[in-house]
Amino acid sequence: MILEIFYTSLISTLKISLVVLSTIYIVNYFLNKGLLEKISNFLAPITEKLKLNSFLISSIMVSFLSPTVGYTLLSDGIKDNKLTEKEVLFGSLANSFPAVFSHALTYYVPVVIPILGYTGIIYVILRLFIAFVKSIIGILLIKATSGGEKYLKENLKIEKPKNINKKFEKSPFNKTFDFSKRFIPLMFLSMFGVIYLSKMGFFEHFSILILPITSFFNLNPNTGILAITGVINVSAAMVMAGTFLKSSSLTPNEVIIGLLLGNIVAFSTRSVKHSIPLHFSLFGPKRGSKVILLNASLTIILDIFIISFLIIYM
């Protein structure tokens, strides 16, 4: 049985990796050709018409290239007294769509969609929609509470930090190769683990533990398993979701619900690993906590809204 699972996992991994790595290469090729810079320049006149603080405009535009640099600009703005605390908080919301759009090009499109197909497209659209709503809310709150437009005339030209292009110095082939070194082993191990545990009946036994929760919302127990897997590793959850789809263990709607639930449950884990160190170093513990809680709370609320909609109309 082990040899059969090994062979099945290997073949599946090679098929998926061929599509994923080809897409990764194409995406990196266009990124190296300045795709995100062109998008940023195309949107610049729109953001300028909003008459926002120039620091906020720069932060939004740069977030298409690097969300971390976008947050750094917000940090610099408040340190130089060019931004108020409210502008920083609401500006972090405004950066949501550019940041997720950048992540969509580098992960969602080349990885999620090849694995999940049509369901992956819907999931990516939902993630972009949630980020877009957050950005609109952030901009509206800035407009309602900020007098930042007085700084606009000081710097109508949006300039990116000189070191922003360091992220794109590697060739598309080298970046694809670096990605493959992480992706292929994880894909194979995830595929092997999912198939092995499925053959051993693990998911049937494990589903009993989360049955009360899934029963309350009238969900397939596998959605809970998918959500928990998403907390452990996002890519593993994508592999599992693809397996559930192929075996018809979950419908497309149930897969999306499971992934969104995983996003909610994983909030605390992601905060400890990524958000807290980054935001505390940029904004300090007090202000950094506010940025994290504001963004996470709004994301969770929007996730819950979409999950509720899918459950009601499923």
Image: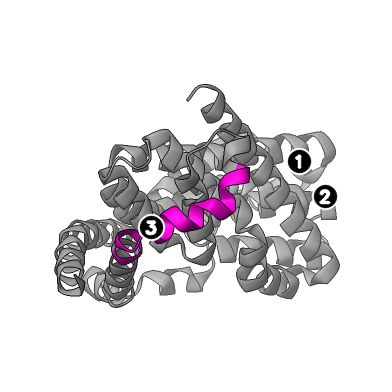
Give the magenta part as a residue range: 196-213
Residue 92 vertical placement versus 187 (above, below): above
The disc, 2 or 3, on the residue closer to the chain's N-terminal end is 2
Residue 8, given in percent of the width and then of the height, sits at 16, 63
Mark 2 Cα shell of 10 Å, populated few (<14), some (14-19), many (≥20): some
- For label 2, the residue is 86
* Residue drawn where x is 48% and y is 37% of the image: 126
Could you say which is closer to the camera, residue 202 or residue 63?
A: 202
Q: Which mark is residue 142?
A: 1
Label 2 with label 1: CB-CB less than 8 Å = yes
Q: Main secondary structure of the magenta part?
A: helix
* Residue drawn where x is 81% and y is 34% of the image: 144
Q: Quadrant of residue 10?
A: bottom left
Mark 3 Cα shell of 10 Å, populated few (<14), some (14-19), many (≥20): some
Residue 15 vertical placement versus 177 (above, below): above
* Residue drawn where x is 67% and y is 62% of the image: 268
Residue 119, given in percent of the width and then of the height, sits at 35, 39
Could you say which is closer to the camera, residue 108 or residue 250?
A: 250
**Could you tell me which secondary element the residue under label 1 belongs to?**
helix
Distance from the alpha carbon under mark 1 to that under mark 3: 30 Å
**Could you tell me which secondary element the residue under label 3 belongs to?**
helix
**Could you tell me which secondary element the residue under label 2 belongs to?**
helix
Q: Is residue 221 magenta?
A: no
